[in-house]
Amino acid sequence: MCGIVGLHLKTERHHDALGRLLSPMLDCLETRGPDSAGLAIYSEPVPVGSFRYSVRIDGLDPDADTKTVVTTLALELSQDLGSPVTCERVRPDGAVLIASDRVREVTSRLAERRPDATVVGFGRHIEVVKDVGRPRDILRRHEIDDRTGYQGVGHTRMATESAVTTDHSHPFAPNADLALVHNGSFSNHATVRRRLAQSGIRCVTDNDSEVAARLIGREVDSGATLETALKTVGQEMDGFYTLLVTTAREFAVVRDSFACKPLVVAETDEYVAVTSEYIAMTSLPGIGSARVFEPTPGEIHVWER
Amino acid sequence: MGTVTETAPEAGLENTLELDCATLSTREVNTALRELPARSRVRIVNPRGRHNLAVALDQELDIEIAGHAGYFIGGLCDGPSITVDGFVGWSLAENLMSGTVRVRGNASECCGATGHGGLIVVHGDTSSRAGISLKGAELAVGGDVGHMSGFMAQAGTILVGGNAGDALGDSLYEAVIYVAGSIASLGSDAQVEDLTQEDVDRVRSLVERAGFDHISPEDVTRVASAKHLYNFDALKEQKY
């Protein structure tokens, strides 16, 4: 069992409150996933040619000032890359750095400087937070209430098929501005992982959801729409799933053909909200007059901005 | 303990107790309900999607849930009459023994699962697996039911006022399904059978008790088991 939340704001009215709206939704679903949690938050883009990199550094010295560490790291990377690297946000587990959009170059220089660093998400719009522990603690530690933006997804995890680690927690964000959260389990993920590896796409964990994220990433990279990519998941992957997948422009949900995992959608003139259980969206403004429905088995819903 | 208030009595009724989910935990609500004398009247306010309300009660109570509620509403009950003025989540009235559970809006998956007795009425739609493994209860849905409804239902009646989704009545046993609208597809071992006068009477009675006015008992489709999967044959073709 896991919990999924998502909020796609159609108007600018609640942009400043995105974090404050998402936090209680995620906290409410601790019952579905108490071991880890994560979020992807989409806000206004950084300039063309650059990406935000959500960087987790495992070996941060608890006695050192994280701000000094990541600011120094940004300076060193600037020299290594020959282009500016700035620190947009200092986080308890690392930082959000803004650097060139040459992802391979940036990640390899980062790995040279800090072998204990992991890029958990990147893109012009996205920031990704992943952590282990109770959702409430993670929300507080990462000050999610202060986040602004136009779209966010979250996940509370109750691990059933792979380890409880930060790398195994959701969202999975293998491509620029792409994020996936999953409730369910894929039974043929090992087979699909091997197929992806044959085409040069490697997973970093043994988690089943990462395979779906990378499969969708491959399709989107090849020019597919998110809807088409989700159809490919339905064709190639076997198992139970409710998926919420987002890009910079799209916000999409799908349930497996048996609808084994729950999902509730609420839509108003101002937002689209999705949660595993209705109770997790009752904190939203105007929920009483929202159009509330459940996607039927295999039905793909996509909202675009 | 939070707010438990008594409101002014209505004509011909005993006092109505009000339980407020905004100040009471689910356990407090259910404990308060369990301690009530029979024939009490209760209104549960501010449910806001709360799960497990009004479960495992064995008195004749009249309970109104004023708003949308969550999973397992009215589950395991043996006596009370429960009305939800809103929609509900998964597994409404699961394993109901007797009494009535009525939902004015829609119900999510597995509505009425394993119900042994009593009446479950949903005025709106239900999603997948309505009446799964029904064991004798009556389930009346005014609108549509989702896929795999009536799966492995062993006894009882399912009435669908709207349309039924795919794989209706898969692996049915003795339960009978009546559908007023269309059927997307029948499940394995489910078949359409001729309607008898007994069926019409059974549907009419259920329609009246559900309070529906859009179903003609003579015009429903009867779905029952073809009984090819009725028994599990362990030696069939010596495969097992």
Image: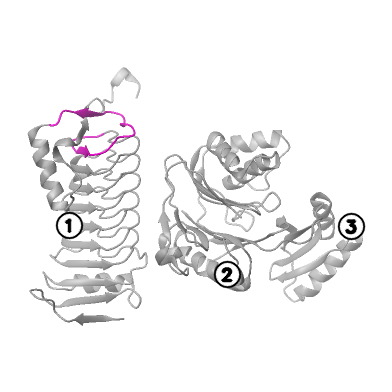
Same chain for the residues at labels 1 and 2, yes or no? no
Mark 2 nearby-residue class (10 Å; few <14, some 14–19, many ≥20): few
Three-letter code for the amino acid on which mark 2 is drawn: Arg
Q: Chain of mark 3?
A: A
Could you tell me which secondary element the residue under label 1 belongs to? strand
Magenta stretch: give its range: B172-195
Relative image position of residue B227 (x, y in whole percent): 21, 27
Three-letter code for the amino acid on which mark 1 is drawn: Thr
Q: Provide the residue designation for mark 1.
A: B100
Mark number for residue B59?
Answer: none
Mark in the foreground, 2 or 3: 2
Whether pointer 1 and pointer 3 mark residues with C-beta atoms closer than 8 Å, the reply is: no
Relative image position of residue A165 (x, y in whole percent): 61, 57
Mark number for residue A13?
Answer: 2
| SS assignment for the magenta stretch, majority | loop
Relative image position of residue A173 (x, y in whole percent): 66, 52
